[in-house]
Amino acid sequence: MKIFALIIFIVTYALMIALQKVRPWVALGSAAVFIVAGIVPPADIFPSIDFNVLLMLAGTMGTVSLFIASGMPGRLAEILLHKAPNTMWVAVAMSLFAGIVSAFIDNVATVLMIAPVGMAVASKLKISPVPLIICIAVSSNLQGAATLVGDTTSVMLGGYAGMDFLDFIFMDGRPGIFFAVELGALVTVPVIMFIFRRQRQRVETVGETKVRDYFPTVLLLANIALLIGASFIPNKPSITNGLICVAVFLVAAVKAAVSAKGLAPVKRALRDIDYETILLLAGLFIVIRGITNAGIIDDISGIFVKLGGNHIFLLYTVVVWGSVLISAFVDNIPYVATMLPVIQGVAAAMGVEPTLLYFGLLIGATLGGNLTPIGASANIAGIGILRKAGFEVKTADFTRIGVPFTLCAVLTGYLFCWFVWG
């Protein structure tokens, strides 16, 4: 059964890379195979799907549709273009801004809120939005490890290790993982500059976009504030963030319907929700549960321990770079959940503090998703936005940015944590 599950998993990802236009149906078909084969029993189907992420996607996409229709993304794009000396620095500024926001709210929500501005910028500059949106997505994914509230994996580590928000910044008198991630973000700036090195043209805009309605913008800011506030609520329901995003969209929809004296803007917003991306993620959640139930994730954890042996530096290296490789294909949430007790046990057996290995796991597992277009939900969301706008993103287009971005950021965090905590 384990070999069968592994084969299905490998075939699934190979087909998703080769047949990009039918990724959702490949994922759903693979999920159906796992269910029919009994690897994912009926009782595990719904628990395996992260409805929090799906509700966040649907709710935020609806609100963002109204945000785009208001004209605000175009106006923000013009303000940014007036401030930046050239196109290259526009890309750097947008990527860093996306990263800063993502340190405090979910990566997917960050991409959905900032990508429309990126699309407007690309339209005004008459350039392809593909590299810009990819940079926004990978930057969002990078900064998720910076704080306790930036990503689900960070929340999991904080809960398991008894860490609070400040421990991510300073812990036991030493700089925490926050500084490792921020240094990694700074190192990625030359990568972004290199990608946009030929786009040094002076930024010029003609005219000024009129904002027709400020209410969607206010709601998006309220959405961010509510998500940050909710992150500090102990023992909150797992779908809290999703419910917040859906509730904000409902408020925006009611206001739009009242203002338009009809349901036309609401219908347009509902059409703009990327249902294919939602189906893709739902299928992948079931696939990951399948290989988890088959014991493949546990086997991977055991391999790490064997490779690391009793040498802390070697074990740390295996944890970081092994997590990068695995997270490029496997959802990092079940992987991190499996590895946390493994790391604690190994550290106890070696007589060392587990903090170094915890930080190494978080860096590798969070950033590894940037290696492939389907390695992180933020990447999938960004590519979904591009696809709906009529732009095809090839795997080569993504890896050209994602691979150097990931390697630079991980190497920086890897070295920082070792010299500070090793």
Image (spheres, rainbow, N blue to C red):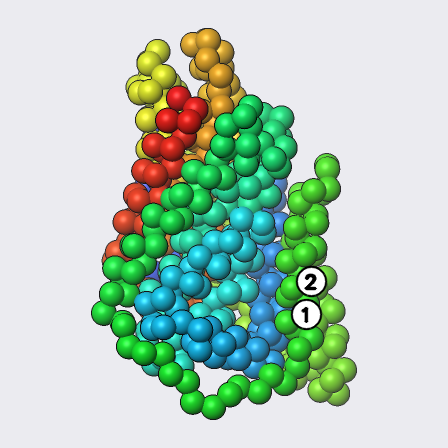
Q: What quarter of the picture does the N terminus occupy?
A: top left
Q: What quarter of the picture does the C terminus occupy?
A: top left
Q: Give the secondary structure at mark 1.
A: helix
Q: Is residue 79 above or below residue 416?
A: below
Q: Nearer the viewer, residue 213 or 66?
A: 213
Q: Give the secondary structure at mark 2.
A: helix
Q: Is residue 395 visible?
A: no
Q: Which mark is residue 222?
A: 2
Q: Nearer the viewer, residue 66 or 110?
A: 110
Which residue sits furthest bottom? 207
Q: Position of residue 341 (x, y in %)?
A: 52, 21
Q: Position of residue 384 (x, y in %)?
A: 44, 64
Q: Is residue 190 left or right of residue 83?
A: left
Residue topped by disc 1:
218
Residue type at the position of mark 1: Val
Residue type at the position of mark 2: Ala
Q: Residue at x 25, y 59 (%)?
A: 194
Q: Nearer the viewer, residue 58 or 8?
A: 58
Q: Is residue 396 left or right of residue 374?
A: left
Q: Position of residue 347 (x, y in %)?
A: 46, 15
Q: Which mark is residue 13?
A: none
Mark 1 Cα shell of 10 Å, populated few (<14), some (14-19), many (≥20): few
Q: Are marks 2 and 1 in contact (CB under 8 Å)?
A: yes
Give residue 25's quadrant in the image: bottom left
